[in-house]
Image (cartoon, coloured by chain):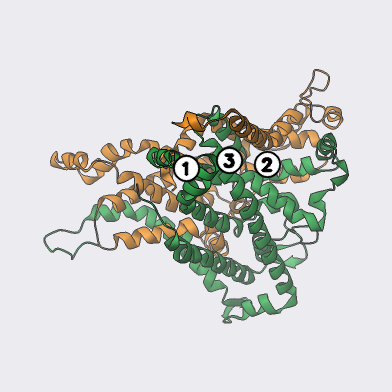
Amino acid sequence: MAADIRPKRPFRWHIAIFLAPAVLVYTAIMILPLAGTLQLSLFRNIEQHQVFVGLDNFRTLFGDPNWSVNFWNALRNNVWFFIIHMLVQNPIGVMLAALLSSPRLRFAAFYRTAIFVPTILSFVIVGFAWKLILSPLWGVAPHMMDLVGLKSLFTPWLGKEEYALTALSLISVWQFVGIPMMLIYAALLSIPEEVIEAAECDGITGLSQFWKIKLPLILPSIGIISILTFVGNFNAFDLIYTAQGALAGPNYSTDILGTFLYRAFFGFQLQVGDPNMGAAIATMMFLIILGGVCVYLFLVQTRLRRYQF
Amino acid sequence: MSTATRSLPRTIGAHAILLTYTAIALFPVILVIMNSFKSRAGIFGAPLTPPTPKTFDLIGYTTVIGQGDFIHYFQNSLVVTVASLFFVLLFGAMAAFALSEYRFRGNSLMGLYLALGIMIPIRLGTVAILQLMVASGLVNTLTALILVYTAQGLPLAIFILSEFMKQVSDDLKNAGRIDGLSEYTIFFRLVLPLVRPSMATVAVFTMIPIWNDLWFPLILAPSEETKTVTLGAQLFLGQFVTNWNAILAALSLAIMPVLILYVIFSRQLIRGITSGAVK
Protein backbone atom coordinates (compact mmCIF):
# COMPACT_ATOMS: atom_id res chain seq x y z
CA MET A 1 0.00 0.00 0.00
CA ALA A 2 2.52 2.55 1.11
CA ALA A 3 5.45 0.68 -0.33
CA ASP A 4 6.56 3.04 -3.03
CA ILE A 5 5.66 6.46 -1.71
CA ARG A 6 8.99 6.98 -0.11
CA PRO A 7 11.63 4.42 -1.00
CA LYS A 8 13.37 4.70 2.36
CA ARG A 9 10.28 3.46 4.21
CA PRO A 10 9.80 -0.31 4.09
CA PHE A 11 6.39 -1.85 3.43
CA ARG A 12 4.43 -1.55 6.64
CA TRP A 13 3.09 -5.05 7.08
CA HIS A 14 1.27 -4.24 10.28
CA ILE A 15 -1.18 -1.99 8.43
CA ALA A 16 -2.09 -4.83 6.11
CA ILE A 17 -2.41 -7.22 9.04
CA PHE A 18 -4.63 -4.82 10.97
CA LEU A 19 -6.90 -4.33 7.96
CA ALA A 20 -6.90 -7.84 6.52
CA PRO A 21 -9.47 -9.71 8.67
CA ALA A 22 -12.13 -7.00 8.48
CA VAL A 23 -11.59 -6.36 4.77
CA LEU A 24 -11.61 -10.07 3.95
CA VAL A 25 -14.78 -10.94 5.85
CA TYR A 26 -16.55 -7.79 4.69
CA THR A 27 -15.59 -8.31 1.06
CA ALA A 28 -16.31 -12.03 0.98
CA ILE A 29 -19.63 -12.03 2.84
CA MET A 30 -21.02 -8.64 1.96
CA ILE A 31 -19.59 -6.95 -1.12
CA LEU A 32 -19.09 -10.00 -3.34
CA PRO A 33 -22.57 -11.44 -2.61
CA LEU A 34 -24.09 -8.03 -3.28
CA ALA A 35 -22.26 -7.88 -6.60
CA GLY A 36 -23.15 -11.53 -7.21
CA THR A 37 -26.81 -10.79 -6.63
CA LEU A 38 -26.75 -7.90 -9.09
CA GLN A 39 -25.09 -10.22 -11.59
CA LEU A 40 -27.56 -13.07 -11.00
CA SER A 41 -30.39 -10.76 -11.89
CA LEU A 42 -29.08 -10.75 -15.46
CA PHE A 43 -29.15 -14.54 -15.76
CA ARG A 44 -31.88 -17.11 -15.98
CA ASN A 45 -31.90 -20.83 -15.25
CA ILE A 46 -32.68 -22.59 -18.51
CA GLU A 47 -32.38 -26.39 -18.46
CA GLN A 48 -30.12 -26.38 -15.40
CA HIS A 49 -27.76 -23.82 -16.92
CA GLN A 50 -27.41 -20.20 -15.98
CA VAL A 51 -27.87 -18.33 -19.24
CA PHE A 52 -27.20 -14.65 -19.69
CA VAL A 53 -30.48 -12.97 -20.62
CA GLY A 54 -29.65 -9.30 -20.25
CA LEU A 55 -32.51 -7.32 -18.78
CA ASP A 56 -35.14 -10.00 -19.48
CA ASN A 57 -35.81 -10.62 -15.78
CA PHE A 58 -36.59 -6.96 -15.34
CA ARG A 59 -38.84 -7.04 -18.40
CA THR A 60 -40.70 -9.91 -16.72
CA LEU A 61 -40.82 -8.03 -13.45
CA PHE A 62 -42.34 -4.92 -15.03
CA GLY A 63 -44.18 -6.43 -17.99
CA ASP A 64 -45.53 -9.85 -17.02
CA PRO A 65 -48.80 -9.30 -15.12
CA ASN A 66 -47.98 -12.29 -12.85
CA TRP A 67 -45.06 -10.28 -11.48
CA SER A 68 -45.71 -6.64 -12.21
CA VAL A 69 -49.01 -6.45 -10.33
CA ASN A 70 -47.32 -7.76 -7.21
CA PHE A 71 -44.23 -5.64 -7.69
CA TRP A 72 -46.07 -2.35 -8.06
CA ASN A 73 -48.36 -3.31 -5.20
CA ALA A 74 -45.37 -4.03 -2.96
CA LEU A 75 -43.63 -0.82 -4.02
CA ARG A 76 -46.76 1.27 -3.42
CA ASN A 77 -47.27 -0.30 0.00
CA ASN A 78 -43.63 0.28 0.82
CA VAL A 79 -43.92 3.96 -0.08
CA TRP A 80 -46.99 4.29 2.17
CA PHE A 81 -45.09 2.47 4.93
CA PHE A 82 -42.29 5.04 4.59
CA ILE A 83 -44.66 8.02 4.47
CA ILE A 84 -46.32 6.95 7.72
CA HIS A 85 -42.92 6.67 9.37
CA MET A 86 -41.88 10.11 8.18
CA LEU A 87 -45.16 11.73 9.20
CA VAL A 88 -45.68 9.99 12.53
CA GLN A 89 -42.46 8.48 13.84
CA ASN A 90 -40.06 11.35 13.22
CA PRO A 91 -42.26 14.23 14.44
CA ILE A 92 -43.14 12.28 17.60
CA GLY A 93 -39.45 11.47 18.06
CA VAL A 94 -38.48 15.13 17.71
CA MET A 95 -41.23 16.21 20.09
CA LEU A 96 -40.24 13.69 22.75
CA ALA A 97 -36.58 14.66 22.40
CA ALA A 98 -37.42 18.35 22.72
CA LEU A 99 -39.40 17.69 25.88
CA LEU A 100 -36.71 15.43 27.32
CA SER A 101 -33.97 17.96 26.73
CA SER A 102 -35.73 20.77 28.58
CA PRO A 103 -33.44 21.84 31.40
CA ARG A 104 -33.82 20.23 34.79
CA LEU A 105 -36.67 17.99 33.80
CA ARG A 106 -37.17 15.42 36.54
CA PHE A 107 -37.30 11.69 35.74
CA ALA A 108 -35.77 12.37 32.30
CA ALA A 109 -33.62 9.23 32.60
CA PHE A 110 -36.66 7.14 33.42
CA TYR A 111 -38.69 8.41 30.44
CA ARG A 112 -35.72 7.95 28.11
CA THR A 113 -35.15 4.38 29.22
CA ALA A 114 -38.83 3.43 29.12
CA ILE A 115 -39.59 4.93 25.71
CA PHE A 116 -36.61 3.10 24.21
CA VAL A 117 -37.79 -0.33 25.46
CA PRO A 118 -39.84 -1.29 22.35
CA THR A 119 -36.82 -0.61 20.12
CA ILE A 120 -34.76 -3.37 21.72
CA LEU A 121 -37.49 -6.00 21.40
CA SER A 122 -37.49 -8.38 18.48
CA PHE A 123 -40.05 -8.10 15.68
CA VAL A 124 -41.40 -11.49 16.62
CA ILE A 125 -42.37 -10.23 20.05
CA VAL A 126 -43.69 -6.91 18.78
CA GLY A 127 -45.67 -8.46 15.93
CA PHE A 128 -47.28 -11.10 18.08
CA ALA A 129 -47.95 -8.93 21.10
CA TRP A 130 -49.82 -6.40 18.94
CA LYS A 131 -51.61 -9.14 17.09
CA LEU A 132 -52.95 -10.36 20.43
CA ILE A 133 -53.86 -6.88 21.61
CA LEU A 134 -55.72 -5.98 18.41
CA SER A 135 -57.37 -9.38 18.23
CA PRO A 136 -61.15 -9.23 18.65
CA LEU A 137 -60.91 -12.60 20.43
CA TRP A 138 -59.03 -11.24 23.39
CA GLY A 139 -60.88 -7.97 23.44
CA VAL A 140 -58.21 -5.77 25.00
CA ALA A 141 -58.40 -3.11 22.29
CA PRO A 142 -62.24 -2.93 22.15
CA HIS A 143 -62.36 -2.93 25.95
CA MET A 144 -59.95 -0.01 26.17
CA MET A 145 -61.76 1.92 23.46
CA ASP A 146 -64.96 1.34 25.40
CA LEU A 147 -63.41 3.15 28.36
CA VAL A 148 -63.18 6.33 26.29
CA GLY A 149 -66.49 5.69 24.59
CA LEU A 150 -65.12 4.85 21.16
CA LYS A 151 -66.02 1.19 21.03
CA SER A 152 -68.04 1.62 17.86
CA LEU A 153 -64.84 2.57 16.01
CA PHE A 154 -63.16 -0.76 16.68
CA THR A 155 -62.65 -3.19 13.83
CA PRO A 156 -60.09 -5.97 13.52
CA TRP A 157 -57.62 -3.64 11.84
CA LEU A 158 -55.02 -6.26 10.97
CA GLY A 159 -57.64 -8.33 9.19
CA LYS A 160 -59.10 -5.59 6.99
CA GLU A 161 -57.47 -4.88 3.66
CA GLU A 162 -57.96 -1.14 3.91
CA TYR A 163 -56.47 -0.75 7.40
CA ALA A 164 -53.92 -3.55 7.78
CA LEU A 165 -50.94 -1.78 6.23
CA THR A 166 -51.51 1.44 8.15
CA ALA A 167 -51.96 -0.50 11.39
CA LEU A 168 -48.70 -2.36 10.80
CA SER A 169 -46.89 0.87 9.94
CA LEU A 170 -48.08 2.37 13.20
CA ILE A 171 -46.90 -0.70 15.11
CA SER A 172 -43.51 -0.26 13.47
CA VAL A 173 -43.58 3.42 14.43
CA TRP A 174 -44.36 2.40 18.01
CA GLN A 175 -41.33 0.13 17.96
CA PHE A 176 -38.81 2.51 16.44
CA VAL A 177 -39.74 5.93 17.75
CA GLY A 178 -36.87 5.57 20.23
CA ILE A 179 -34.24 5.94 17.52
CA PRO A 180 -35.15 9.44 16.23
CA MET A 181 -35.82 10.43 19.82
CA MET A 182 -32.30 9.47 20.93
CA LEU A 183 -30.49 10.95 17.94
CA ILE A 184 -32.35 14.25 18.16
CA TYR A 185 -31.90 14.27 21.92
CA ALA A 186 -28.14 13.90 21.42
CA ALA A 187 -28.17 16.74 18.89
CA LEU A 188 -30.17 19.00 21.21
CA LEU A 189 -27.79 18.34 24.09
CA SER A 190 -24.84 19.36 21.94
CA ILE A 191 -26.23 22.87 21.34
CA PRO A 192 -24.01 25.13 23.44
CA GLU A 193 -25.44 26.99 26.42
CA GLU A 194 -24.28 30.36 25.06
CA VAL A 195 -26.51 30.12 22.01
CA ILE A 196 -29.55 29.40 24.18
CA GLU A 197 -28.58 32.16 26.61
CA ALA A 198 -28.17 34.64 23.79
CA ALA A 199 -31.61 33.71 22.53
CA GLU A 200 -33.06 34.19 25.98
CA CYS A 201 -31.45 37.61 26.28
CA ASP A 202 -33.22 38.52 23.07
CA GLY A 203 -36.47 37.34 24.58
CA ILE A 204 -36.83 34.22 22.45
CA THR A 205 -38.11 31.52 24.77
CA GLY A 206 -40.32 28.46 24.86
CA LEU A 207 -41.85 27.28 21.61
CA SER A 208 -40.48 30.06 19.46
CA GLN A 209 -37.02 29.25 20.81
CA PHE A 210 -37.51 25.69 19.59
CA TRP A 211 -38.69 26.74 16.11
CA LYS A 212 -36.24 29.59 15.57
CA ILE A 213 -33.07 28.44 17.31
CA LYS A 214 -33.03 24.73 18.04
CA LEU A 215 -34.78 23.32 15.00
CA PRO A 216 -32.40 24.90 12.45
CA LEU A 217 -29.49 23.59 14.48
CA ILE A 218 -30.75 20.00 14.54
CA LEU A 219 -31.71 19.88 10.84
CA PRO A 220 -28.63 17.77 9.93
CA SER A 221 -29.74 15.17 12.49
CA ILE A 222 -33.25 15.19 11.06
CA GLY A 223 -31.66 14.54 7.67
CA ILE A 224 -29.81 11.56 9.09
CA ILE A 225 -32.87 10.03 10.73
CA SER A 226 -34.80 10.50 7.49
CA ILE A 227 -32.27 8.53 5.49
CA LEU A 228 -32.00 5.88 8.22
CA THR A 229 -35.79 5.54 8.16
CA PHE A 230 -35.75 5.29 4.38
CA VAL A 231 -33.13 2.52 4.30
CA GLY A 232 -34.79 0.67 7.17
CA ASN A 233 -38.26 0.84 5.62
CA PHE A 234 -37.31 -0.27 2.14
CA ASN A 235 -35.45 -3.19 3.68
CA ALA A 236 -38.18 -4.17 6.15
CA PHE A 237 -39.48 -7.70 6.26
CA ASP A 238 -39.61 -9.17 9.75
CA LEU A 239 -42.61 -7.35 11.19
CA ILE A 240 -44.88 -8.10 8.23
CA TYR A 241 -43.68 -11.69 8.12
CA THR A 242 -44.36 -12.31 11.82
CA ALA A 243 -47.68 -10.50 11.93
CA GLN A 244 -49.16 -11.49 8.56
CA GLY A 245 -47.03 -14.37 7.26
CA ALA A 246 -45.14 -14.56 3.97
CA LEU A 247 -48.33 -13.98 1.98
CA ALA A 248 -48.64 -10.53 3.60
CA GLY A 249 -52.38 -10.84 3.93
CA PRO A 250 -55.17 -10.00 3.83
CA ASN A 251 -54.99 -10.40 0.06
CA TYR A 252 -51.43 -8.99 -0.27
CA SER A 253 -52.54 -5.69 1.19
CA THR A 254 -49.49 -5.53 3.48
CA ASP A 255 -47.01 -6.87 0.95
CA ILE A 256 -43.80 -4.83 0.88
CA LEU A 257 -40.61 -5.34 -1.12
CA GLY A 258 -39.01 -7.50 1.60
CA THR A 259 -41.85 -10.02 1.75
CA PHE A 260 -42.19 -9.96 -2.06
CA LEU A 261 -38.47 -10.76 -2.34
CA TYR A 262 -38.84 -13.60 0.15
CA ARG A 263 -41.71 -15.20 -1.77
CA ALA A 264 -40.04 -14.78 -5.14
CA PHE A 265 -36.73 -16.17 -3.92
CA PHE A 266 -37.97 -19.09 -1.84
CA GLY A 267 -41.37 -19.70 -3.22
CA PHE A 268 -44.38 -20.05 -1.03
CA GLN A 269 -47.15 -22.60 -1.23
CA LEU A 270 -47.99 -22.86 -4.94
CA GLN A 271 -45.33 -20.50 -6.16
CA VAL A 272 -41.94 -22.03 -6.98
CA GLY A 273 -38.86 -20.18 -5.76
CA ASP A 274 -36.76 -18.46 -8.43
CA PRO A 275 -33.34 -17.16 -7.34
CA ASN A 276 -32.91 -15.12 -10.50
CA MET A 277 -36.18 -13.25 -10.08
CA GLY A 278 -35.31 -12.88 -6.40
CA ALA A 279 -32.03 -11.33 -7.46
CA ALA A 280 -33.87 -9.00 -9.84
CA ILE A 281 -36.13 -7.80 -7.00
CA ALA A 282 -33.13 -7.41 -4.70
CA THR A 283 -31.47 -5.36 -7.45
CA MET A 284 -34.50 -3.09 -7.63
CA MET A 285 -34.39 -2.65 -3.85
CA PHE A 286 -30.68 -1.92 -4.11
CA LEU A 287 -31.30 0.75 -6.75
CA ILE A 288 -34.11 2.32 -4.71
CA ILE A 289 -31.99 2.45 -1.56
CA LEU A 290 -28.96 3.68 -3.50
CA GLY A 291 -31.11 6.36 -5.10
CA GLY A 292 -32.35 7.49 -1.70
CA VAL A 293 -28.85 7.57 -0.26
CA CYS A 294 -27.57 9.56 -3.25
CA VAL A 295 -30.40 12.08 -2.99
CA TYR A 296 -29.52 12.47 0.66
CA LEU A 297 -25.76 12.76 0.14
CA PHE A 298 -25.77 15.06 -2.86
CA LEU A 299 -28.96 17.08 -2.54
CA VAL A 300 -29.90 17.19 1.12
CA GLN A 301 -26.64 17.00 3.01
CA THR A 302 -24.77 19.53 0.93
CA ARG A 303 -27.57 22.09 1.30
CA LEU A 304 -27.98 21.75 5.02
CA ARG A 305 -26.05 24.40 6.75
CA ARG A 306 -23.82 23.04 9.45
CA TYR A 307 -22.91 25.15 12.40
CA GLN A 308 -19.52 24.76 13.98
CA PHE A 309 -19.20 25.77 17.58
CA MET B 1 -31.23 31.98 33.61
CA SER B 2 -33.59 29.22 32.77
CA THR B 3 -35.72 29.78 35.85
CA ALA B 4 -37.17 32.76 34.05
CA THR B 5 -38.47 30.58 31.25
CA ARG B 6 -39.85 27.81 33.40
CA SER B 7 -43.45 27.90 34.32
CA LEU B 8 -45.52 25.38 36.22
CA PRO B 9 -48.12 24.68 33.49
CA ARG B 10 -45.39 24.01 30.97
CA THR B 11 -43.63 21.54 33.26
CA ILE B 12 -46.88 19.76 33.97
CA GLY B 13 -47.63 19.64 30.25
CA ALA B 14 -44.23 18.14 29.47
CA HIS B 15 -44.66 15.48 32.14
CA ALA B 16 -48.17 14.69 30.95
CA ILE B 17 -47.02 14.11 27.37
CA LEU B 18 -43.98 12.09 28.40
CA LEU B 19 -45.98 9.99 30.85
CA THR B 20 -48.63 9.28 28.23
CA TYR B 21 -46.04 8.18 25.74
CA THR B 22 -44.22 6.08 28.33
CA ALA B 23 -47.51 4.34 29.04
CA ILE B 24 -48.03 3.67 25.33
CA ALA B 25 -44.49 2.30 25.03
CA LEU B 26 -44.70 0.01 28.04
CA PHE B 27 -48.36 -1.04 27.95
CA PRO B 28 -48.06 -3.98 25.50
CA VAL B 29 -44.98 -5.33 27.26
CA ILE B 30 -46.57 -5.15 30.70
CA LEU B 31 -49.84 -6.57 29.40
CA VAL B 32 -48.12 -9.62 27.90
CA ILE B 33 -45.96 -10.34 30.95
CA MET B 34 -48.85 -9.80 33.35
CA ASN B 35 -51.20 -12.13 31.53
CA SER B 36 -48.61 -14.85 31.09
CA PHE B 37 -49.00 -15.62 34.80
CA LYS B 38 -52.75 -16.14 34.59
CA SER B 39 -55.10 -18.99 33.89
CA ARG B 40 -57.05 -19.03 30.65
CA ALA B 41 -60.16 -17.75 32.38
CA GLY B 42 -58.12 -14.92 33.92
CA ILE B 43 -56.60 -13.96 30.56
CA PHE B 44 -59.96 -13.57 28.89
CA GLY B 45 -62.04 -12.53 31.87
CA ALA B 46 -59.98 -9.60 33.07
CA PRO B 47 -57.02 -8.94 30.76
CA LEU B 48 -56.20 -5.58 32.28
CA THR B 49 -55.85 -6.61 35.93
CA PRO B 50 -52.67 -8.07 37.43
CA PRO B 51 -52.81 -11.75 38.40
CA THR B 52 -54.69 -12.38 41.62
CA PRO B 53 -54.36 -15.54 43.73
CA LYS B 54 -57.52 -16.73 42.01
CA THR B 55 -56.26 -16.29 38.45
CA PHE B 56 -52.55 -17.00 39.03
CA ASP B 57 -51.41 -19.97 36.96
CA LEU B 58 -48.09 -21.12 35.51
CA ILE B 59 -49.66 -23.49 32.98
CA GLY B 60 -48.31 -21.44 30.07
CA TYR B 61 -44.73 -21.71 31.25
CA THR B 62 -44.95 -25.46 31.87
CA THR B 63 -46.34 -25.94 28.34
CA VAL B 64 -43.57 -23.90 26.76
CA ILE B 65 -40.78 -25.56 28.70
CA GLY B 66 -42.30 -28.98 28.08
CA GLN B 67 -42.90 -28.50 24.33
CA GLY B 68 -40.41 -26.18 22.75
CA ASP B 69 -36.71 -26.81 22.90
CA PHE B 70 -36.17 -23.28 24.10
CA ILE B 71 -33.04 -23.88 26.19
CA HIS B 72 -31.33 -25.21 23.08
CA TYR B 73 -32.50 -22.30 20.89
CA PHE B 74 -31.33 -19.97 23.57
CA GLN B 75 -27.86 -21.53 23.52
CA ASN B 76 -27.70 -21.16 19.73
CA SER B 77 -28.61 -17.49 19.92
CA LEU B 78 -26.06 -16.96 22.65
CA VAL B 79 -23.26 -18.67 20.68
CA VAL B 80 -24.06 -16.75 17.50
CA THR B 81 -24.37 -13.40 19.24
CA VAL B 82 -21.27 -13.73 21.41
CA ALA B 83 -19.07 -15.08 18.62
CA SER B 84 -20.20 -12.45 16.10
CA LEU B 85 -19.75 -9.75 18.69
CA PHE B 86 -16.22 -10.94 19.43
CA PHE B 87 -15.20 -10.89 15.78
CA VAL B 88 -16.91 -7.57 15.05
CA LEU B 89 -15.14 -5.92 17.96
CA LEU B 90 -11.73 -7.47 17.31
CA PHE B 91 -11.63 -7.07 13.52
CA GLY B 92 -13.46 -3.76 13.67
CA ALA B 93 -11.06 -2.30 16.23
CA MET B 94 -8.04 -3.51 14.26
CA ALA B 95 -9.28 -1.98 11.02
CA ALA B 96 -10.34 1.22 12.79
CA PHE B 97 -6.87 1.48 14.29
CA ALA B 98 -5.21 1.04 10.91
CA LEU B 99 -7.47 3.69 9.36
CA SER B 100 -7.16 6.25 12.13
CA GLU B 101 -3.51 5.77 13.08
CA TYR B 102 -1.55 5.43 9.86
CA ARG B 103 -1.38 7.56 6.77
CA PHE B 104 -1.09 5.40 3.71
CA ARG B 105 -2.16 5.65 0.13
CA GLY B 106 -5.80 4.67 -0.29
CA ASN B 107 -6.62 5.35 3.35
CA SER B 108 -9.72 7.43 2.75
CA LEU B 109 -10.77 5.22 -0.16
CA MET B 110 -10.56 2.20 2.14
CA GLY B 111 -12.58 4.04 4.76
CA LEU B 112 -15.25 4.85 2.20
CA TYR B 113 -15.30 1.25 0.96
CA LEU B 114 -15.80 -0.07 4.47
CA ALA B 115 -18.48 2.54 5.18
CA LEU B 116 -20.60 1.46 2.19
CA GLY B 117 -22.12 -1.28 4.30
CA ILE B 118 -23.62 1.21 6.75
CA MET B 119 -26.08 2.37 4.14
CA ILE B 120 -26.54 -0.70 1.94
CA PRO B 121 -28.17 -3.53 3.90
CA ILE B 122 -26.47 -6.94 3.67
CA ARG B 123 -29.91 -8.51 3.23
CA LEU B 124 -29.96 -7.50 -0.44
CA GLY B 125 -27.13 -9.93 -1.09
CA THR B 126 -29.06 -12.86 0.38
CA VAL B 127 -29.50 -14.73 -2.90
CA ALA B 128 -25.75 -14.92 -3.47
CA ILE B 129 -24.98 -15.44 0.23
CA LEU B 130 -27.17 -18.53 0.24
CA GLN B 131 -25.39 -19.83 -2.88
CA LEU B 132 -22.05 -19.16 -1.23
CA MET B 133 -23.08 -21.03 1.92
CA VAL B 134 -24.48 -23.95 -0.09
CA ALA B 135 -21.26 -24.14 -2.09
CA SER B 136 -19.10 -24.13 1.03
CA GLY B 137 -21.36 -26.55 2.89
CA LEU B 138 -22.15 -24.07 5.64
CA VAL B 139 -25.94 -24.12 5.33
CA ASN B 140 -27.59 -25.01 8.63
CA THR B 141 -24.49 -24.26 10.66
CA LEU B 142 -24.04 -21.54 13.21
CA THR B 143 -20.79 -20.61 11.42
CA ALA B 144 -22.80 -19.27 8.49
CA LEU B 145 -24.75 -16.97 10.80
CA ILE B 146 -21.62 -15.85 12.63
CA LEU B 147 -19.90 -14.97 9.33
CA VAL B 148 -22.89 -13.02 8.05
CA TYR B 149 -23.40 -11.10 11.27
CA THR B 150 -19.70 -10.31 11.50
CA ALA B 151 -19.80 -8.81 8.02
CA GLN B 152 -23.02 -6.98 8.87
CA GLY B 153 -21.65 -5.45 12.07
CA LEU B 154 -18.21 -4.42 10.80
CA PRO B 155 -19.00 -1.22 8.84
CA LEU B 156 -20.69 0.64 11.69
CA ALA B 157 -18.17 -0.69 14.23
CA ILE B 158 -15.23 0.55 12.15
CA PHE B 159 -16.89 3.90 11.57
CA ILE B 160 -17.65 4.53 15.25
CA LEU B 161 -14.39 3.10 16.62
CA SER B 162 -12.16 5.06 14.27
CA GLU B 163 -13.84 8.28 15.44
CA PHE B 164 -12.92 7.35 19.00
CA MET B 165 -9.42 6.13 18.19
CA LYS B 166 -8.57 9.51 16.69
CA GLN B 167 -9.00 10.93 20.18
CA VAL B 168 -6.34 8.70 21.79
CA SER B 169 -3.33 10.86 22.48
CA ASP B 170 -0.46 10.63 20.01
CA ASP B 171 2.09 11.32 22.73
CA LEU B 172 1.15 8.12 24.49
CA LYS B 173 1.55 6.01 21.37
CA ASN B 174 4.83 7.71 20.45
CA ALA B 175 6.14 7.19 23.96
CA GLY B 176 5.38 3.52 23.50
CA ARG B 177 7.25 3.50 20.19
CA ILE B 178 10.29 5.12 21.77
CA ASP B 179 10.22 2.43 24.43
CA GLY B 180 10.47 -0.09 21.63
CA LEU B 181 6.93 -1.47 21.69
CA SER B 182 5.77 -3.04 18.44
CA GLU B 183 2.73 -1.63 16.65
CA TYR B 184 0.76 -4.70 17.77
CA THR B 185 1.62 -4.15 21.42
CA ILE B 186 0.70 -0.50 21.11
CA PHE B 187 -2.70 -1.48 19.74
CA PHE B 188 -3.51 -4.27 22.18
CA ARG B 189 -1.89 -2.86 25.32
CA LEU B 190 -2.27 0.90 24.97
CA VAL B 191 -5.10 1.75 22.62
CA LEU B 192 -7.65 -1.02 23.21
CA PRO B 193 -7.96 -0.46 26.97
CA LEU B 194 -8.43 3.26 26.35
CA VAL B 195 -11.32 2.84 23.93
CA ARG B 196 -13.09 0.21 26.04
CA PRO B 197 -16.11 2.45 26.77
CA SER B 198 -16.75 3.02 23.07
CA MET B 199 -16.29 -0.71 22.46
CA ALA B 200 -19.15 -1.29 24.90
CA THR B 201 -21.33 1.12 22.93
CA VAL B 202 -20.53 -0.63 19.68
CA ALA B 203 -21.20 -3.98 21.37
CA VAL B 204 -24.71 -2.96 22.36
CA PHE B 205 -25.48 -1.56 18.88
CA THR B 206 -24.21 -4.72 17.24
CA MET B 207 -25.84 -7.13 19.65
CA ILE B 208 -29.49 -6.04 19.44
CA PRO B 209 -30.01 -6.57 15.69
CA ILE B 210 -28.15 -9.90 15.77
CA TRP B 211 -30.17 -11.28 18.66
CA ASN B 212 -33.44 -10.13 17.11
CA ASP B 213 -32.78 -11.08 13.49
CA LEU B 214 -35.26 -13.39 11.84
CA TRP B 215 -34.26 -13.21 8.17
CA PHE B 216 -30.90 -14.98 8.16
CA PRO B 217 -31.79 -17.78 10.63
CA LEU B 218 -34.88 -18.41 8.52
CA ILE B 219 -32.88 -18.63 5.30
CA LEU B 220 -29.43 -19.91 6.27
CA ALA B 221 -30.03 -22.06 9.34
CA PRO B 222 -33.64 -23.18 9.76
CA SER B 223 -32.78 -26.72 10.95
CA GLU B 224 -33.83 -27.89 14.39
CA GLU B 225 -30.24 -27.97 15.72
CA THR B 226 -29.37 -24.45 14.61
CA LYS B 227 -32.59 -22.54 15.30
CA THR B 228 -32.09 -19.31 17.18
CA VAL B 229 -34.46 -18.18 19.86
CA THR B 230 -36.11 -15.61 17.56
CA LEU B 231 -36.83 -18.16 14.87
CA GLY B 232 -37.85 -20.77 17.44
CA ALA B 233 -40.28 -18.35 19.05
CA GLN B 234 -41.71 -17.44 15.65
CA LEU B 235 -42.38 -21.08 14.73
CA PHE B 236 -43.62 -21.94 18.20
CA LEU B 237 -46.06 -19.03 18.17
CA GLY B 238 -47.32 -20.11 14.77
CA GLN B 239 -48.00 -23.63 16.06
CA PHE B 240 -49.73 -22.69 19.28
CA VAL B 241 -52.02 -20.02 17.87
CA THR B 242 -54.94 -21.15 19.99
CA ASN B 243 -53.07 -21.84 23.20
CA TRP B 244 -53.02 -18.36 24.66
CA ASN B 245 -51.30 -19.39 27.89
CA ALA B 246 -48.40 -20.88 25.97
CA ILE B 247 -48.14 -17.93 23.58
CA LEU B 248 -48.08 -15.34 26.33
CA ALA B 249 -45.54 -17.37 28.30
CA ALA B 250 -43.31 -17.82 25.24
CA LEU B 251 -43.48 -14.10 24.50
CA SER B 252 -42.60 -13.27 28.09
CA LEU B 253 -39.68 -15.70 28.03
CA ALA B 254 -38.42 -14.02 24.87
CA ILE B 255 -38.86 -10.52 26.29
CA MET B 256 -37.31 -11.04 29.70
CA PRO B 257 -33.63 -11.77 28.93
CA VAL B 258 -33.44 -8.78 26.57
CA LEU B 259 -35.27 -6.58 29.04
CA ILE B 260 -33.00 -7.56 31.93
CA LEU B 261 -29.87 -6.95 29.83
CA TYR B 262 -31.30 -3.64 28.72
CA VAL B 263 -32.02 -2.48 32.24
CA ILE B 264 -28.44 -3.36 33.20
CA PHE B 265 -26.81 -1.74 30.17
CA SER B 266 -29.24 1.06 29.37
CA ARG B 267 -27.01 3.68 30.94
CA GLN B 268 -24.11 2.54 28.76
CA LEU B 269 -26.25 2.43 25.65
CA ILE B 270 -27.81 5.83 26.16
CA ARG B 271 -24.49 7.41 27.06
CA GLY B 272 -23.07 5.91 23.89
CA ILE B 273 -25.82 7.36 21.74
CA THR B 274 -25.82 10.77 23.34
CA SER B 275 -22.04 11.11 23.46
CA GLY B 276 -22.19 11.76 19.77
CA ALA B 277 -21.08 8.37 18.54
CA VAL B 278 -23.73 8.35 15.84
CA LYS B 279 -24.05 11.95 14.87
Q: Which residue is mark 2?
A: A125
The chain under label 1 reads A
| Mark 3 and mark 1 on one chain | yes
Distance from disc 3 to disc 1, alpha carbons, whole Å, reads: 11 Å
Residue in the foreground of this view, choosing between B201 and A86: A86
Which residue occupies the extreme left position in the image?
A: A8
Q: Position of residue A88 (x, y in %)?
A: 65, 50
Which residue occupies the extreme top position in the image?
A: B53
Q: Which residue: 51% across, 35% down?
A: A102
Figure quadrant of residue A46? bottom right
Q: Earlier in the sequence, mark 3 or mark 2?
A: 3
Q: Which residue is mark 3?
A: A96
Question: Crowdedness of circle 3 by 10 Å Cα count: few (<14), some, many (20+)?
Answer: many
Q: Amino acid at mark 3?
A: Leu
The chain under label 2 reads A
Residue A222 visible here:
yes
Q: Amino acid at mark 2?
A: Ile
